[in-house]
Amino acid sequence: MKLRSSVKKTKSKLEKSPSFRFPSFRGEPEKLRASRSHDSLLAPGIEPLEINANEDAVIRPVHSSLSGQDNCFEVITPSGSRCFSCRTGAERDRWMENLRRSIQPNKDHLRRLETELRLCVMEAQGLPPKKRYFCQVCLDGALYACTSSKPRLESLVWAEVFELAGLPPVRHVTLYLYKDSDKKTRRGASQRDKASYLGLVSIPVDGRAESGASWCHFGEKWYPLSGPPPGKGKVVSPVPALRLKWLLRSLNVLPVEQYRWRERQREGERERESGGRERERERVRVEGEWWEREREGERARVEGEWWERERVVREREGGSESGERECECVLCLCLCLCLCLCLCLFLSFPPHFFHHLTSLPCRGIDLFPKATHSHCACCFTDH
């Protein structure tokens, strides 16, 4: 694979001469003037970078504190290293991912360990005042970031946070403390090449990077500085120390087949759970219907018994009423028969019989006193 990087082009003698000017490229291209320089004026400003598959190359992001620009990454090969700058962080991540896949095509089918570090360099103590200090952050001996140079007045506070992702397995996190040189360059920046080394702080990871398991470790405390011994007659009190707050997290990434297998297992479990829930809902529904039918049957049975009792009671009440009515009817019939018999007897006797009865004395009392008026049987009038 060919990767092009911009390189600085050396100027030829003609380019350094104020009388020489490059032709304008606006409109139609013009012919270049003749030059006796051995440097080619048409030499491109970019050169290819060869990266082969399965090559022992390292592709990592470069912190802006080292490169001076944002969104940079570095490609380290056995032949050397190159640094590239991108417009955005997403573009940088895309380039790094494509390059890693070109070097390792079967990346998704291998088990790997990805590490990320969040480090906060907070402050320092026990350092001489009126001097400028800075720290370099190294992981397993490789430089990854650098703090700004700040003076030590009443206190020395950096409070700078470094977030480094996509790291290889880390065994040691080391911070090197330097005293910046007082000399200034023309651009106003300190000469860090002439900085004085004061000491270091080493944080071991306790070999957990080799375990191959996901883990997370957090730490916040004062770390004493371990450095070269002071000269003769010099006593360092108190011991310089750095206050650090850091979080190192390692993630074990499995091959994609295992994730697919686990996803299928989860889908099967979800289907079984959904099927179990469906069966449970069906069972509850059937039981509810059965209990509803039972309640309906019980209610119908109770209502039937109630109506049966009502019918029996009504039948009993109706029987007594019919008996009373029958008794009344028999009594009325007897009375009617008695009246009819009396009428028949009355009509069967002659009239003089009744007259004879009326004439019979009863102890001086007439049973049928003589009527003062006679009645006509035809017109019911008195005669």
Image (cartoon, rainbow, N blue to C red):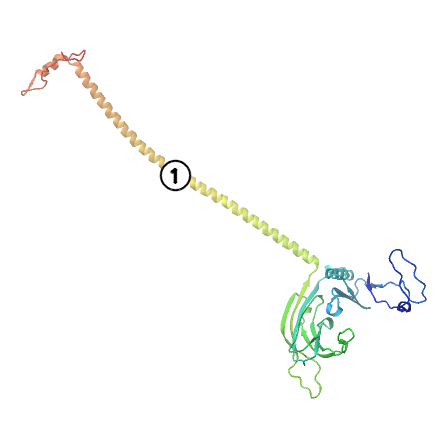
Q: Residue at x 39, y 39 (%)?
A: 305
Residue type, numbered disc 1: Glu
Helix, strand or loop for disc 1: helix
Q: Residue at x 38, y 38 (%)?
A: 306
Q: Quadrant of residue 173?
A: bottom right
Given residues 315 and 156, the one toward you in this image is 156
Q: Is residue 357 left or right of residue 235?
A: left
Position of residue 333 measured from the top left corner of the image (x, y, whole percent) = 24, 23
Position of residue 131 measured from the top left corner of the image (x, y, whole percent) = 70, 79
Q: Is residue 378 left or right of residue 321?
A: left
Given residues 226 and 319, the one toward you in this image is 226
Q: Which residue is label 1 attached to?
A: 305
Position of residue 62 measured from the top left corner of the image (x, y, whole percent) = 74, 67
**Above or below, 30 relative to 14:** above
Q: Where is the C terminus found, in terms of image quarters?
A: top left
Q: Furthest residue to the bottom?
A: 233
- Quick one: label 1, few (<14), some, or many (20+) residues within 10 Å? few
Given residues 305 and 68, the one toward you in this image is 68
Given residues 295 and 125, the one toward you in this image is 125
Q: Is residue 299 left or right of residue 49?
A: left
**Above or below, 330 relative to 167:** above
For the question of whether residue 272 can be seen, the reply is: yes
Q: Residue at x 40, y 38 (%)?
A: 304
**Above or below, 108 relative to 339:** below
Q: Quadrant of residue 121?
A: bottom right
Q: Residue at x 64, y 66 (%)?
A: 215
Position of residue 352 measured from the top left corner of the image (x, y, whole percent) = 12, 12
